[in-house]
Image (tube, rainbow, N blue to C red):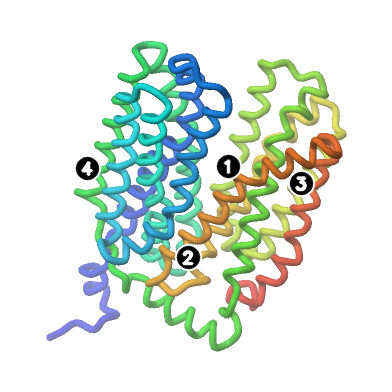
Amino acid sequence: MRLPVFSPLAMQETAPPRRRVLWLSCVAHAMHDGYTDMIYALLPVWQSEFGLDFAALAILRGIYAGTMATLQLSAGRLAQHLGSRTTLTIGTLLAALGYAIAGMSGGLLGLGVALAISGGGSSTQHPIASGAVSRIYGRDARGPLSIYNFSGDLGKSALPAAISLLVTLMPWRHALWIVAGLGCVVAAVIALWFPAVPRGAGKPRAKEHASARRSGTGGSGFPTLFSIGVLDTAVRMGLLTFLPFLLKAKGVSPQLLGTALALVFIGGAAGKFMCGWLGARMGVAGTVLLTEGGTAACIVAVMYLPLALTMVLLPILGMMLNGTSSVLYGTVPEMSAPERTERAFAIFYTGTIASGALSPVLYGFLGDRIGVHGATYATALTALAIFPLALALRPHLADDSTG
């Protein structure tokens, strides 16, 4: 006798293992985000090795970020044909191969080609891994996505620190080959153990989504969510551009400046972890209002508080700055059908990465015109500008519209 589709046994036989999808996605996120930020630790090494000026170093960083941002939509489309596991495996191998080639390069051109390959490989991670997590968990994805989001910060902390240590123990080329080998190991693990997540894994959520569209809770909410993500990233990157100068004006020492920034980043990692779960309880709009309002208040407070109180406030500032992102990432699946989840994530990540690249430049020009304090005020006003967008998003969210 054929078991009905709601039978627990049938569900156990057909549902991919959620935990394996989540934890392997977290490993991929940590690896790729670590590769992305590892460049910062390598720039001084390359400057010394090849005699590069600051413009050339900026070009190298831009090549990686540019290829990663522009190819995310293509990566999402590729996953629709090859599947999440194959696409993520290929992307991780390419990211590792790029750094292996960088270890064999002899100048700016070779480094540029290598970083373009690595950045192209890393373009697969965000849309594919986050899409797999959202599909496998369905409407319960908000909490797991916050864990996934948090794992990227672990990679950003671990790999740059590891490469900084390795280049003191061996030639930098050998150090790159070691981290490239680690990427190949991660790719092999993904190829062997990452479950094939079927497109139908999120069908219950698809029905809810269709129902939400008919009742007015779906509709055109994604552009509003996208706009919030772009502005939120602009606030974060703009403030981090000016924060060292604000702290130096308070008399912070170079050694303490590193500690101060570490406090912000630690708070940011905690904010990513906590606010995804908070969004499931307070609602998306309410959490965004809380984090953006808290961000604006903390920015103003940092400008006027004495140094001791500012240091105490910095972890809270980090939580507010980064907390919104987990809520937004967890909401992306609600704004798309399950079969278009990767594309929605690709569009969203492309916008936030582009905002992260452009906003420091725009705020920098503003700082040259009106000063550091004036430009910092502008970041706080940008955070407050998200308020009407959060309120406009609320009717498109089933959980928020009922609360």
The location of residue 304, given as percent across then percent down, is 87, 34
Q: How far apart are marks 2 and 3 (CA)?
A: 27 Å
Q: Mark 2 points at which residue?
A: 344
Q: Residue 58: x percent and y percent?
A: 55, 32
Q: What residue type is labelled 3?
A: Thr
The mark lying in front, picked from 4 and 3, is 3
Residue type, numbered disc 4 = Ala
Residue plotted at (43% across, 65% down): 343
Out of 142 and 71, give the one closest to the viewer: 71
Q: Residues within 10 Å of mark 3 (few under 14, many from 20)?
A: many
> Which residue, given by chain and number where applicable, does mark 1 sit on?
270
Tell me which residue sits at (35%, 13%) in the image. Answer: 171
Residue marked by disc 4:
188
Mark 2 and mark 3 lie on one chain; the one further toward the N terminus is: 2
Q: What element carries label 3?
A: helix
Residue 403 seen in render: no
Which residue has dot 3 on it? 379
